[in-house]
Image (spheres, rainbow, N blue to C red):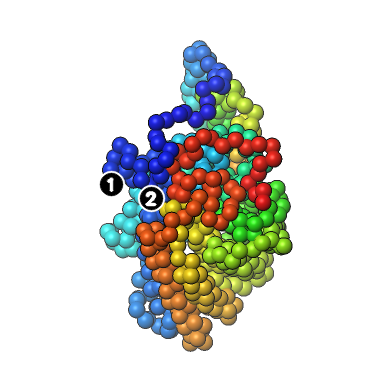
Amino acid sequence: MENEKHHIVSYKTYTVILLVLIALTFISIGITNIELGSFAVTGALLLASVKSFLVLTYFMHLKYDKPYIILMVAFVFAVFLAVIIITFFDYFFR
Amino acid sequence: MQATSKIPTDVSYLEYKGKYKGLLSWILSTDHKRIALLYMYSMMVLFLVGVALGLAMKLELIAPGKTIMEANDYNAVFTVHGVIMIFMIVIPGLPAVFGNFMLPIMIGAKDVAFPKLNLLSWYVYIAGALLVIASLLFGPGTPDTGWTFYAPYSFKTGTNMLPAIFGAFVLGFSSILTGLNFIVTIHRLRAPGMKWTKMPLFPWTLYGTAWIQLLATPVVGITLVLVALERIFGIGVFDPALGGDPILYQHLFWIYSHPAVYVMILPAMGAISEIIPTFSQKHIFGYKAIIASTLAIAFVGYFVWGHHMFTSGMSGTAQYTFSILTFLVAIPSAIKVFNWISTMYKGSIRMETPFYWAASFIFIFMIGGLSGLVLGALSTNIYVHDTAFVVAHFHFIVFGGVGFSFFGAVHYWFPKLYGRMYEKSWANVGWLTFTIGFLALYSPMFYLGMQGMPRRYYDYLEEFHSANILSTLGSWVMTFGLVIILINLYRSSKNGKIASINPWDGKTLEWTVPSPPPVENFDEVPVYGEKDGPYEY
């Protein structure tokens, strides 16, 4: 909408986030060389979560959006989490 | 603010001569109303194919043993019938046709938020439909897995599965794009003063539906890609021989496909919530309760998928969790029925064709819903699982629910779509014939299922014969009713009496614009005052 304020994110911020994402990608490849046992998947998921958080916050502009947009995204993640938990009601108790 | 344009406001969308002429003026139009009709005509063609396949199945079942087809042909016929009817008709049905046509008008907008994306959705829909049809015509054999594409059979069968799977995947994209468009449209383009609590109920149900389309459809998309990868490369996600888990496929499939039932039924309930107050000439009873129940159905509907899997071998904990959650969905559904009945109470009821469809919807939906409780309860589910009882329940909900609502909506909004009235007496004859045929077709299946007749078999024991004859006769009567309805609507769209702006004395915004509406719907964007509302009779 033309009469709403738009927040301009600087190139510097975008560049820093891009570099952090690239670094995290290398780290996620690197840790596969370390024997973490059952924590390997946890580590990979944690790194992926951090990367998703950065993309959502800066590249997808959530940091500068109205609260209801953030609420929508949070709601989606809550539903996703609930679906995962309920699915594991089968796998954990089979 | 919506941009001003030079499109004339006194020319209807059907007569408007834009940049293109003839067929191009339809298939390149970004007008939400023309796109809605594109969907409706495409779906009608596919629907008739699905009906023909259904009739073939019922004819096969008129007697035990082979009647008109072999067992493998029967497997292919019920698979294609299911894929067409589910993925191409009932899931996109009401949102793509009446959502597209009515949503912008009902909320006082000139179009949806992304008109070009809207047209793209239709093209994606057609591409998906063509892929599925290609799986029938080319390759090693028609898909025979059923519409659920269950693993491991779906990646082991020698039939032409890949185009069908990819077609369903592409159809999902169309659904996602439409859902996204509707969410943005409802958030951003409501008329000034139309608060959330003043929005009509049909847009509300489209809103709940759009969220399901957006969140659940990607799950089935990814799942179908995994089946394709399993088939081509043998990656071992679902294949037990490679350490995979076929029950995981069922989880992933139903995580989408159960919410998809609510994609089908919520807009159907929305259309009924428009028809009943109009023909009762009374404010809808429990407006906010209906909104809450809509959102509750959409939300709880995400967490009940496991009731399709009670006999699959999943854990007991999961079984009773899903059973309890399933019973929760019955509550908001019952709230809606209570509110519709209460709206009619002491109303000035007008017995017109849309009202007949709506009233019979409630009757049939109640039977479908209550038989759903039989399937939601663990003990009884085990008994009737994979029997004709499930087929009866499913068709009472999906065909009886969505189908009756769709035909109700067609007869309700027909004057607005074409600017003409249909022949009411023939419309009533069509409804009555169709309803009698429907009940004769599907009711015997409850009995057959209780007696133990399994579904998806082309043969059966002699003791099931008489009920199957009744069912097949019902399919003929229902199809005869359908023919009456379609001929009447087709003839009326060409030669029917000219309809007024508001032939039913409705109060929602679509009844304030000409019939048929101009391209951009409104001369001036309507403004809702403090005392205005969608059902102020």
Residue sitting at 54 percent across and 78 percent down?
B444
How far, Cα to Cα, is label 1 from label 2? 13 Å
On screen, residue B28 above or below B139: above
On screen, residue B77 above or below A65: below
Query: What x and y, as percent, mark residue B106?
Result: 55, 44
> Quick one: SS at disc 2?
helix
Residue sitting at 36 percent across and 42 percent down?
B16
- Report the side of A20 relative to B118 (left or right): right
Number of numbered tags placed on the structure image: 2
User: In the drawing, what numbered circle is on residue B38?
Assistant: 2
Residue sitting at 35 percent across and 71 percent down?
B73
- Mark nearer the viewer, 1 or 2: 1
Q: Nearer the viewer, residue B155 or B38?
A: B38
Q: Is residue B205 visible?
A: no
Query: What x and y, as percent, mark residue B77?
Result: 38, 68
* First of labels 1, 2 by sequence position: 1
The residue where tag 1 is placed is: B22
Crowding at label 1, few (<14), some or many (≥20) Cα neighbours within 10 Å? few
* Chain letter for the residue marked with disc 2 in the picture: B
> Quick one: SS at disc 1?
loop
Q: Is residue B513 visible?
A: yes
Q: Amino acid at mark 2?
A: Leu
* Chain letter for the residue marked with disc 1 in the picture: B
